[in-house]
Amino acid sequence: MYEFEYSRATSLEDAASKIGADEEAKLVAGGMTLLPTLKLRLAKPTQLIDLATLPQLKGITEEGDAVVIGAMTRHADVNRSDVVKRGIPALAAMAGLIGDPAVRNRGTIGGSIANNDPAADYPAAVVALNATVTTNTGKHTGDSFFKGLFETALSDGELVTSVSFPKVEKAAYMKFPNPASRYAMVGVFVAKTAGGVRVAVTGAGPCVFRVKAMEDALAKNFSSDAIKDIKVPADGLNSDIHASAEYRAHLVNVMARRAVDAANK
Ligand SMILES: Cc1cc2nc3c(=O)[nH]c(=O)nc-3n(C[C@H](O)[C@H](O)[C@H](O)COP(=O)(O)OP(=O)(O)OC[C@H]3O[C@@H](n4cnc5c(N)ncnc54)[C@H](O)[C@@H]3O)c2cc1C
């Protein structure tokens, strides 16, 4: 690790002004991604500002037709929440598939979506549910938040405060996990809400993406049969020691059909 200053945020404004004033400053949430990055000397921040001292960023509430999750809420809390289980059972189940118990007890939804790892699970839920990401300066739709590999719409000095998910009629998430890390080799979140049907894929490409052809077919007939012949092209998908682009393309169809079947149960 390189040397850095560490401070605990005293307020949202304090955290925002510190990261706004210093390009090399970093927020720390659960530290599950940031700390390994520092240990490997892949990042050299001047200061870390800890968000753990801000209780207003934690917690889960029901607000009409939405479930609102504070940025510092840990995956384990989303997994166990009765509010999430009632409104969006697929989201609670998805949180329970992230990493291992240690990761789920430290990692947060804000850290996960701000990091936008191409194999992370939450981006699929945020896009499939077209969730609203609230920050200290405004709001982003699920569709506009994730911009590319490890890239989001957050600007300098902007931090995630909460994510609002609409309750679902039917939804399910299916992932083919990397056996070592449990990150998604491919994960597909299928959701039917008042806003329509959406299919979001993580792990397969450099950034989460939607499969419009599947969405159109499922809007007419919400059954796995309706999408059995819809394939995504392997061009541009990730290819690494774990799986080729062609294999990932194949998995998108398999996981999507399994997700529809699970949503229909
Ligand atoms: C062994 C292992 C296995 C994992 N497996 C999975 C998996 O299967 N699926 C999965 O989805 N994830 C997985 N993860 C990732 C993990 O779940 C965390 O979500 C992720 O590490 C980031 O969350 P964090 O709270 O730890 O953020 P941190 O590591 O503290 O921060 C990550 C980044 O986000 C920024 N940040 C944090 N909070 C905010 C905020 N509120 N606003 C703006 N920026 C912010 C930080 O500055 C930093 O750049 C795994 C991690 C590990 C170590």
Image (cartoon, helix red, strand yellow):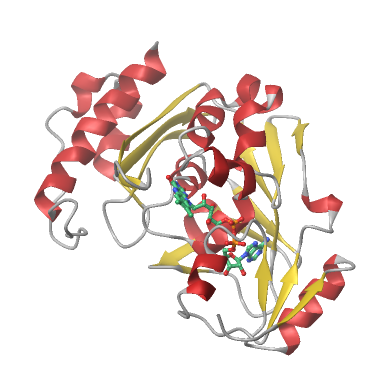
Ligand 1 is found in the corner quadrant, namely: bottom right
Q: Quadrant of residue 51?
A: bottom right
* Residue closest to the eye, 91 or 43: 43
How far from the left and from the top, in percent, is residue 21? 75, 88
How far from the left and from the top, in percent, is residue 265? 40, 10
Residue drawn at (18%, 60%), measured in percent from left and top? Answer: 240
- Inspect this view and state whether residue 242 appears: yes
Say above or below: 166 vs 159.
above
Tell me the quarter of the image containing the N terminus.
bottom right
**Side (left or right) of 131 relative to 198:** right
Q: Quadrant of residue 226?
A: top left
- Inspect this view and state whether residue 222 appears: no
Say above or below: 48 vs 102.
below
How far from the left and from the top, in percent, is residue 76? 62, 36
Q: Quadrant of residue 54?
A: bottom right
* Residue closest to the eye, 220 or 52: 52
Residue drawn at (64%, 27%), measured in percent from left and top? Answer: 80
Residue drawn at (58%, 45%), measured in percent from left and top? Answer: 131
List the single residue furthest toward the top: 265
* Residue closest to the eye, 51 or 208: 51
How far from the left and from the top, in percent, is residue 112? 54, 55
**Side (left or right) of 2 relative to 252:** right
